[in-house]
Image (cartoon, rainbow, N blue to C red):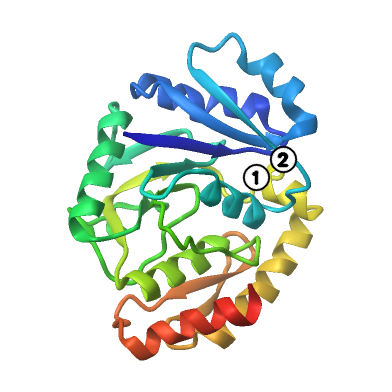
Amino acid sequence: MYKIAIPSYKRPNLLATTTIPMLMVGNCKEIYLFINEDEEDSYREVLNSINIKINYCLLKNCKGIGNVRNYIRNFFDVGDWIISIDDDIKGLYIGDEIIEDVNDFIFTGFEIAQNEGVKMWGVQLCSNPLFHKEGYTTNLTYINGSFTGVIISDEELTTDIDHFEDYLFSILHFLRDGKLLKFTECWIKTKPFNKIGGICQQLGGLDKRKQEAEENGMKLAGHFPDMMRLKYSKKYDVQNIRLNYKFKWSPDAAISGYNYLTDYI
């Protein structure tokens, strides 16, 4: 059986009105909530009346979403099925229809991932039907950190950055495992660049996050030039990344992932 991990920062009320109701309606029974130890009381005050089992996993001196995601990956046992879900997810959809049985969808996702020999899987972030395609892809693709399934390995991958940490995980998993898994007709409803809590507040505000996006984008593009390119997002007024879905795995390419880990992590 899979386990649900939710990282959250200064968003107890948002969590209580978005992700948790979605999971409860979707027949999910238990979550592991990763929060700073000094926020436990504020989260319990909001969440104690909600009828879902919450395991409070308290973080000490663990700053930044990159470090938190590293912590989550090392918290669980090798072989565990972990679905990491952000604290502001309003719904999970296939096409224009909401997926009501989230529990069944997650379990099926892990079964397909295991059959494909994939250690990381996810869904679309975009709601535009023009970008939706029935089925799934195992090419190099962006697995958004807001909804990510991971099968824990004995040598788990880590990130050294906050903004674009999910792009880095996508690249490193592809280089190590040879493929990823994304359900291309399924997508999550969320609000990127939310100024309340989360990574924006951790980094010191939206402008600081945009600055980190610029710096981390340049860093990743310099190390993985054949796998990605930078593209400015007018919608969010921030530097963004486009992965090269035609990129093919090779032993030489895999070495670049190993070199990144040894150079930076």
Q: Left of 231 or right of it: where is 196?
A: right
Q: Quadrant of residue 115?
A: bottom left
User: Residue 237 versus residue 77: which sits nearer the camera?
Assistant: 77
- In the rendered view, would you say 90 is above or below 179? above
Query: What residue is drawn where x is 68% and y is 32%?
Result: 11
User: Residue 235 versus residue 100: which sits nearer the camera?
Assistant: 100
The residue tagged with tag 1: helix, strand or loop? loop
- Residue 218 image label: none
Find residue 14 and report its horizontal and vertical position in percent.
Answer: 62, 29
Find residue 61 and report its horizontal and vertical position in percent.
Answer: 78, 47
Q: Left of 48 or right of it: where is 229?
A: left
Find residue 219 and report its horizontal and vertical position in percent.
Answer: 63, 80
The N terminus: image quadrant = top left
Residue type at numbered disc 1: Asn
Do the CB atoms of the residues marked 2 and 1 lie less than 8 Å apart? yes
Which residue in the protein does label 2 denote? Answer: 197
- In the rendered view, would you say 100 is above or below 191? above
Query: What residue is drawn where x is 45% and y is 35%?
Result: 4
Q: Left of 254 or right of it: where is 146?
A: right
Residue type at numbered disc 2: Gly
Which residue in the protein does label 1 denote? Answer: 194
Q: Residue furthest bottom?
A: 252
Query: What residue is drawn where x is 22% and y is 45%?
Result: 111
